[in-house]
Image (cartoon, rainbow, N blue to C red):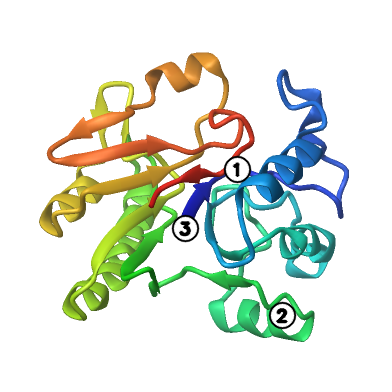
Amino acid sequence: MIYAIADLHLSFGTDKPMDVFSGWVNYTERIRENWQKLVTPEDTVVIAGDISWAMKLSDIDKDLAYIQSLNGKKIILKGNHDYWWTTKAKMDRYLAEHGFDSIAILHNNYFVVENTALCGTRGWFYDAEKDEDMLILKREVGRLRMSLEPAVQAGYEPVVFLHYPPVYNGMECREIMDVLREYRIKKCFYGHVHGGNAAKKAFVGEKDGIQFHLIACDYVKFMPLSIK
């Protein structure tokens, strides 16, 4: 089975607990309990960004140890709060050196699980207008293509994971949506959106033949969502 969730916001190595927010009390215990009941060691879980509040790679040991202790293979991608994120080579080396062998990085690449290509990137703001935002968005579009193109060329059907919502509050990030439409993506999962009022503005459903799912931790009640 393949599952997905986003926005774990772990802070075992730093002092920024999410428990202060409504609905997040004992969230790490709730995640663990739900996860271990649902996910088997043979399953795969994609975590779509905002993994940890750590500011640098050297501060993330305890958070990754928590993820390592959970069942299944975990594939992680970058969120807007993942300031610890660095080059894929450095992160791969860090994971290997610390024995985090159930965790892999989704960054300019893809993974094949059950004949499905797991593709994705962080994405960017749906309403980006400033020059600096447009440069970041252009880079994210390129990374999404780098993930999708080889997967499609290899004959796999891709599923896309993003951190930022490509459709929100009646608006869409046209540059990201154009890529999803071009590659005829059927399923897209995203996080980032928290709280009841914000979630009401998030698009969940079908648009242009694409089924969109919000997988932010609190939205899915701290339980990984089955995608296949």
Q: Is residue 198 above or below residue 226?
A: above
The residue shown at (50%, 49%) is: 4
Query: Mark 3 packing: few (<14 Cα in 10 Å), some, or many (20+)?
Result: some
Q: Is residue 30 above or below residue 69?
A: above
The residue shown at (80%, 26%) is: 25
Nearer mark to the viewer, of 2 and 3:
3
Instruction: Say which label, 2 or 1, has the lower sequence index.
Output: 1
The residue beneath circle 2 is 94
The residue beneath circle 1 is 7
Labelled disc at residue 183: none
- Quick one: SS at disc 1? loop
Q: Is residue 224 above or below residue 204?
A: below
Hey, which quadrant is residue 173 in on the image?
Answer: top left
Gap in angstroms between the C-alphas marked 1 and 3: 21 Å
Q: Nearer the viewer, residue 113 or 59?
A: 113
Gap in angstroms between the C-alphas marked 2 and 3: 27 Å
Query: Mark 2 packing: few (<14 Cα in 10 Å), some, or many (20+)?
Result: some
Q: Nearer the viewer, residue 74 or 106?
A: 74
Gap in angstroms between the C-alphas marked 2 and 1: 21 Å
Nearer mark to the viewer, of 1 and 3:
3
Q: Nearer the viewer, residue 148 or 101?
A: 101
Amino acid type at mark 3:
Met
The residue beneath circle 3 is 1
